[in-house]
């Protein structure tokens, strides 16, 4: 059984998106006081939406709309139709709580099953899940998708390394699903314990945090896997499973029969030219409990044009390049942590882990200290040369000066959750 509609054509997709957009606006207007008020204020009625060209008339929604409407923002169905809620971590205010109907759960499971299919899994695979469970969407999504796909599912969650190593060996795990930080931690543990000959993992699916090419290369090197896939998703849009890169790893195929993706300039809020980076905006096409209309994700990416050689009939977007709200300003330059990540991943001798520390000099000037791990096996005698090379590349590419400290491999924290990269103590410490 295939979960991917391989007969999907451009004309079919336009009709699906048009019908879905009309339905979403009508459904939200009828069922949500928030959306009705927002659309009325914009002078828009559901009947005004006749084609995809009308999408631009609709007002944006943002995370503040979800937080101000706590605890049930965007709810567009009766409480009797809601069977589950999930929520974000709430690190920047009230948790963003999203409602799910049974149809929403089924659609999500089917989308996630597509991800496993596009990764080349079969029902003979054994999927070990190391992401979090509970209010967070990750564990529930990975598990439901694996079960819908029909593979054996091993739902450990972010358990300790001992248990993961034991189950990986005893269960014959072939697919490991984790954050990049957890995957790196496990790869290093497997290498340290000399377990590589006892495990059968051939594919890793990474989600929940951005990660560098250097980190992927290190994980692959330590575990000897065939492929490392990048999954996308966020709590507001069901959860993880909205798309995955195929075996060619040239962009993430996203399920355009379930969403409309726009890329806008985050400052002008206007669409950017095809292929240009900007902020991803999502409109759902069949989500009942908490539909999204032009939701600003604040994730930075771009849409790739043209078909993929894998033959999957869905469009692709780039890996997430950063977030408009994790950008920091240093000496009047706007910088994304992903820019630093990108530079470091292209310097030989540098490991995958780093931290950015922003401070004030005694005279009040900003300073940026980069703590960067050297690659495993690289001599400490090379630290001065590596530090100079990193500082030079950052100045050349980002146009700012920095102080670079090379630290021992493995000295920066490993975690089963998202790694903290930015420590800004200039105006009270914030962590990203």
Image: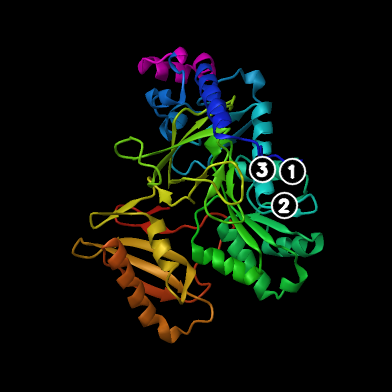
Residue 75 horizontal/vertical position (percent): 54, 23
Q: Which mark is residue 126?
A: none
Q: Is residue 182 visible?
A: yes
Left or right of residue 256, residue 115 in this image: right
In this view of the protein, which residue sits in the foreground, 200 or 387? 200
Secondary structure under tag 2 reads loop
Kindly indicate the quadrant of the structure image that contains residue 390. bottom left
Q: Earlier in the sequence, mark 1 or mark 3?
A: 3
- Residue 37 coordinates in the image, percent (x, y): 42, 16
What secondary structure is marked by label 1? helix
Q: Which residue is mark 3?
A: 114
Query: Total of numbered circles in the picture?
Result: 3
Residue at 50%, 36% in the rendered image = 95
- What residue is shown at x 34% (from left), y 67% (from top)? 369
Asked whether 40 falls inside the magenta stretch, the response is yes
Task: Identify residue for label 2.
Answer: 121
Horizontal side of residue 72 vs 226, given as left or right: left
Q: In terms of secondary structure, what is the magenta stretch mainly?
A: helix
How far is disc 2 from disc 3 in space, using C-alphas?
Answer: 10 Å
Question: Which residue range is magenta in the image?
Answer: 27-47
Q: At 38% from the left edge and 59% from the top edge, which residue is drawn?
A: 339
Q: Earlier in the sequence, mark 2 or mark 1?
A: 2
Which residue sits at x=68%, y=48%? 116
Q: Residue furthest bottom?
A: 381
Left or right of 243, for residue 400: left
If you read the primary sequence from the N terminus, does the residue marked by circle 2 or circle 3 appear first? 3
The correct choice, above or below, for 386 with respect to 180 in the image is: below
Q: Say left or right for 392 vs 198.
A: left
The reply to whether discs 1 and 3 touch (Cβ–Cβ < 8 Å) is: no
Q: Are marks 2 and 1 in contact (CB under 8 Å)?
A: yes
Q: CA distance from mark 2 to mark 1?
A: 9 Å
Give the residue pinned by disc 1. 149
């Amino acid at each position: 059984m295939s979960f991917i509609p391989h007969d999907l054509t451009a004309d079919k997709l336009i009709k699906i998106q048009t019908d879905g957009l009309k339905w979403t606006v009508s459904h939200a207007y009828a069922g949500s006081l928030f959306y009705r008020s927002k659309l009325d204020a914009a002078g828009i009625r559901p009947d005004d939406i006749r084609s995809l060209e009308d999408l631009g008339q609709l007002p944006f929604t943002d995370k503040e709309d979800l937080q101000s409407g706590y605890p049930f923002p965007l709810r567009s169905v009766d409480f009797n139709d809601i069977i589950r809620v999930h929520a974000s971590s709430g690190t920047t205010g009230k948790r963003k709580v999203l409602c799910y109907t049974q149809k929403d759960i089924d659609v999500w499971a089917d989308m996630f099953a597509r991800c496993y299919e596009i990764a080349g899994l079969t029902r003979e695979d054994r999927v070990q899940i190391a992401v979090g469970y509970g209010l967070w969407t990750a564990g529930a999504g990975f598990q439901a998708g694996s079960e819908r796909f029909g593979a054996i599912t091993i739902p450990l969650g972010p358990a300790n390394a001992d248990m993961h190593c034991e189950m990986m060996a005893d269960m014959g795990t072939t697919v490991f699903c984790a954050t990049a930080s957890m995957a790196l931690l496990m790869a290093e543990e497997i290498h340290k314990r000399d377990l590589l000959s006892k495990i059968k993992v051939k594919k890793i699916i990474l989600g929940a945090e951005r990660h560098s090419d250097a980190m992927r290369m290190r994980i692959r090197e330590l575990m000897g896997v065939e492929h490392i896939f990048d999954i996308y998703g966020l709590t507001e849009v069901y959860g993880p499973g909205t798309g995955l890169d195929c075996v060619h790893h040239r962009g993430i195929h996203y399920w355009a029969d379930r969403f409309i993706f726009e890329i806008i300039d985050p400052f002008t809020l206007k669409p950017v030219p095809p292929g240009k980076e900007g902020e991803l905006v999502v409109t759902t096409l069949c989500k009942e409990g908490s539909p999204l209309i032009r939701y600003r994700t604040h994730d930075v990416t771009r849409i790739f044009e043209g078909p993929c050689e894998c033959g999957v009939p869905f469009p692709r977007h780039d890996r997430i390049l950063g977030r408009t709200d994790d950008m920091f300003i240093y000496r009047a330059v706007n910088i994304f942590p992903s820019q630093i990540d990108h530079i470091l991943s292209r310097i030989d001798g540098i490991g995958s882990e780093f931290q950015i520390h922003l401070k004030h000099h005694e005279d009040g000037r900003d300073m940026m200290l980069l703590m960067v791990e050297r690659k495993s096996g690289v001599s400490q005698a090379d630290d001065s040369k590596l530090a100079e090379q990193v500082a030079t590349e950052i100045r050349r590419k980002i146009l700012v000066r920095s102080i670079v400290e090379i630290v021992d491999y493995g000295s920066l924290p490993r975690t089963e959750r998202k790694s903290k990269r930015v420590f800004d103590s200039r105006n009270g410490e914030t962590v990203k």
